[in-house]
Image: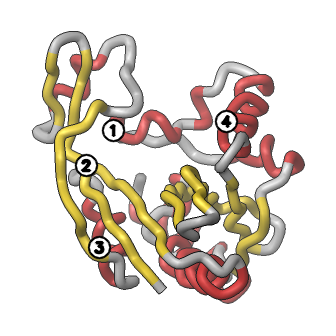
């Protein structure tokens, strides 16, 4: 993305207006306004590639089925990102988090503000104890954000890449990917933060 476009978009954002709320069905089609990911390593977050509205409905059903929740990151009424929880365990008061920001607004500060607000909600309002996450080691921007907020590295291991593209030969051009059998793998690190 050109520097001029990033500066223009950053000036369109009022970071003091960032808030978190439960993602609802009215938010689903707002994902259609998100920009494209130009980096193939983030193809699983490319909402511009969804074929139709039914694909968005299926995405929402997957994100909200048993032991899962999803929260909208909003600025005014614009959907700037989302935070998903999976493997919610109310006995242990723990879960696994994922976060995605509209590619049009990466590196604008939204993720840091949203995660600070979400961590406060997670530990104080939802009364949870531990938050885990996994991140591909190539995603340095995300790793820097997580560690700046107090997440501690647990382990790194080779895992099957979540999006097995039809032609994943393109991903093999990146250092972090390798083919094992008929699947593609990448290094993934686990992080954790506790109350």
SS state under label 1: helix
Q: Is residue 107 above or below residue 103?
A: below
Viewer-side residue, 83 vs 191:
191
SS state under label 4: helix
Q: Residue at x 72, y 59 (%)?
A: 79
> Which residue is denoted by mark 1 in the rendering?
41
Q: Is residue 82 above or below residue 48?
A: below
Labels 3 and 1: the sequence-earlier one: 1
- Tag count in the figure? 4
State the CA–CA distance, disc 1 to disc 4: 21 Å
Residue 54 in the image: state x and y as whole percent. 78, 23
Q: Is residue 142 visible?
A: yes
Which mark is drawn over residue 62?
Answer: 4
Residue furthest toward the front? 91
Q: Are marks 3 and 1 in contact (CB under 8 Å)?
A: no
Q: Residue at x 28, y 76 (%)?
A: 152
> Which residue is denoted by mark 3 in the rendering?
144
In the displayed structure image, the side of residue 40 where residue 97 appears, left or right: right
In the displayed structure image, the side of residue 33 where residue 143 appears, left or right: left
Labels 2 and 4: the sequence-earlier one: 4
State the CA–CA distance, disc 3 to disc 4: 28 Å
Q: Are marks 3 and 4 in contact (CB under 8 Å)?
A: no
Residue 157 in the image: state x and y as whole percent. 17, 47
> Which residue is denoted by mark 2 in the rendering?
188
Q: Is residue 4 visible?
A: no
Labels 1 and 4: the sequence-earlier one: 1
SS state under label 2: strand
State the CA–CA distance, disc 3 to disc 1: 18 Å
Give neighbour class at mark 3: few <14, some 14-19, many 20+ (Cα, 10 Å).
few
Q: Are marks 1 and 4 in contact (CB under 8 Å)?
A: no
């Amino acid at each position: 993305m050109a520097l001029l476009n990033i500066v223009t978009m950053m000036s369109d954002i009022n970071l003091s207006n960032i808030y978190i709320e439960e993602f609802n069905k009215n938010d689903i089609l707002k994902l259609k306004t998100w920009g494209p990911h130009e980096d193939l390593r983030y193809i699983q977050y490319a909402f511009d590639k969804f074929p139709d509205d039914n694909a968005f409905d299926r995405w929402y059903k997957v994100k909200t089925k048993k032991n899962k929740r999803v929260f909208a990151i909003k600025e005014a009424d614009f959907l700037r990102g989302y935070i998903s929880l999976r493997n919610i365990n109310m006995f242990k008061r723990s879960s696994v988090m994922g976060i995605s920001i509209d590619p049009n607004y990466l590196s604008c500060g939204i993720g840091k503000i949203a995660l600070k607000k979400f961590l406060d909600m997670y530990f104080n309002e939802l009364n949870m104890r531990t938050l885990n996450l996994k991140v591909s080691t190539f995603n340095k921007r995300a790793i820097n954000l997580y560690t700046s907020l107090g997440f501690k590295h647990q382990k790194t291991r080779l895992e099957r890449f979540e999006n097995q593209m039809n032609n994943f030969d393109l991903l093999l051009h990146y250092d972090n990917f390798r083919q094992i059998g008929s699947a593609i793998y990448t290094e993934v690190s686990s992080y954790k933060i506790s109350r």
